[in-house]
Amino acid sequence: MESIDTDSQSNLLLRTIAMPNDTNSNGDIFGGWIMSQMDMAGSILAREISAGRTVTIAVNAMKFFKPVKVGDIVCCYGKLLKVGTTSMTTHLEVWVKPVIRENIDNTSRFKVTEADFTYVAIDNKGNKRPVYST
């Protein structure tokens, strides 16, 4: 997996393109869409760690630093912070490689947001189960 320069322990978990259907009335990408990308990225990591099904149970506060535009490449990076008996907490960051715009170097990236997401490992009946770290 690709690591991001600002945090060598974070791995690229998900990469996608911001599309027109994901915009608000100002033409920027909805914050909720960004949060859903983070949740998908974090769930990939949690699922790999627990070797099975997981559910999101908590997200700490999020603050958005810059808007995301249509066509921007959205990259979700993450790392495991801690593992409990049945839960895992991940730290997730969203970085964007912008489309070519005035006064923006198209090779630069910027951080959009970050948050800690907590997941619980569950069995096929939806009950908590122990996390099996790999």
Image (cartoon, rainbow, N blue to C red):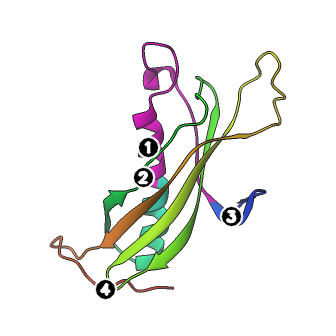
Q: Which residue is mark 3?
A: 1
Label 1 sits on residue: 35
Q: Is residue 33 above or below residue 27?
A: below
In the rendered structure, which disc, 2 or 3, sits on the residue that comes first in sequence? Answer: 3
Determine whether the residue tagged by mark 2 lies in a helix, strand or loop: helix
- Find the distance from the CA under tag 4 to the CA under tag 3: 26 Å
The answer for how far apart the CA atoms under marks 4 and 2 are is 21 Å
Helix, strand or loop at label 3? It is loop
Of the two numbered discs 4 and 3 on the same chain, state the one appearing first in sequence: 3
Q: How many marks?
A: 4
Q: Which residue is mark 2?
A: 39
Mark 4 vs mark 3: in front: 4
Residue drawn at x 52%, y 26% is 19
Asked if the residue under mark 1 is in contact with the one under mark 4, i.e. CB atoms within 8 Å, the reply is: no
Q: Amino acid at mark 4?
A: Pro
First of labels 4, 2 by sequence position: 2
Position of residue 37 in the picture relative to residue 7 (left or right): left
Q: Which residue is the site of mark 4?
A: 130
As shown in the figure, which amino acid type bears the numbered disc 1? Met
Q: Position of residue 133 (x, y in %)?
A: 46, 85
Compute the Cα span from label 3 to label 1.
Answer: 21 Å
The disc placed on residue 96 is none
Q: Residues within 10 Å of mark 1 (few under 14, many from 20)?
A: some
Q: Amino acid at mark 3?
A: Met
- Indicate left or right for 51 with 64 as reference: left
**Which segment did they paint magenta?**
12-40
Mark 1 and mark 2 in contact? Answer it, CB < 8 Å.
yes
Occupied quadrant, residue 65: top right
- Could you tell me how far apart the alpha carbons at marks 4 and 1 are, in whole angstroms? 26 Å
